[in-house]
Amino acid sequence: MDGNKKVTDLWNEFLGRKNLDVIDIRYDAWQFGVEPDKLGQLVLEGKKTATASAYDGYDFYGERIPQVDDYSIILDSKNHPLCIIRTNRVKILKFSEIDKNHALKEGEGDLSLGYWQREHQKFFTKELKDYGKSFSEEMKVVAEEFEVVYVPDNHI
């Protein structure tokens, strides 16, 4: 999926150690938001088990909405792989429908819904401009929950 040899090597290592068949498994490699190192570290620490993204971005970039059982290789700011996650739950909600439970699972700031709303409104406002759209509390958000399924030995 990614031209990064380290990503491919990690994926192959994961498949081998877990004895999984590559034919039946799909994965992407990506970074979190504006602070990929900080957010990636929260994932490694088990504090971040959810994320949210603008629904409109998937259409704009021609990407598929995440699905349950998708795998993702989380990258740091230098595109080095940190870990592999598996998506457990995906909901498409209005921004205003994101609840305190999801905010807590995102693991950021003071873990409150208020913090989540303030920071994500800033993030989405900037992002949506790229799509020629504006932020609204009615905008669709892809709320994704995940679990870490593999951490390479050099990140333990």
Image (cartoon, rainbow, N blue to C red):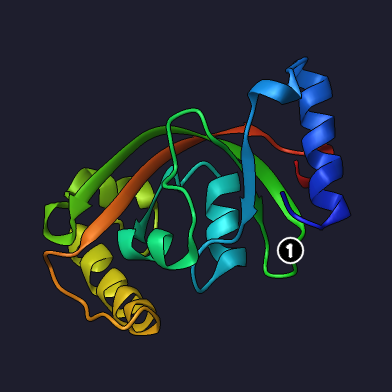
Residue visible at 40% across and 82% down in the picture:
130
Residue 48 visible within the image? yes
Figure quadrant of residue 145: top left
Instruction: Please identify the residue farthest to the top as the structure is shown.
Output: 19
Quarter containing the C terminus: top right
Residue sitting nearer the eye, 10 or 23: 23
Task: Give left or right: position of 67 versus 91.
Answer: right
Residue visible at 35% across and 76% down in the picture:
123
Figure quadrant of residue 128: bottom left
Figure quadrant of residue 30: bottom right
Task: Give left or right: position of 95 versus 9.
Answer: left
Image position of 136 with respect to 83: above or below = below
Q: Amino acid at mark 1?
A: Asn
Residue 137's spot in the image, x, y percent? Answer: 12, 68
Residue 31's spot in the image, x, y percent? Answer: 59, 61
Residue 12's spot in the image, x, y percent? Answer: 83, 33
Task: Give left or right: position of 70 versus 3.
Answer: left
Image label count: 1
Residue 45's spot in the image, x, y percent? Answer: 56, 45
Residue sitting nearer the eye, 30 or 110: 30
Residue 110 visible within the image? no
Residue visible at 30% across and 79% down in the picture:
122
Q: Dot 1 corresponds to which residue? A: 79
Q: Residues within 10 Å of mark 1 (few under 14, many from 20)?
A: some
Residue sitting nearer the eye, 10 or 103: 10
What SS does tag 1 mark?
loop
Image position of 134 with respect to 99: above or below = below
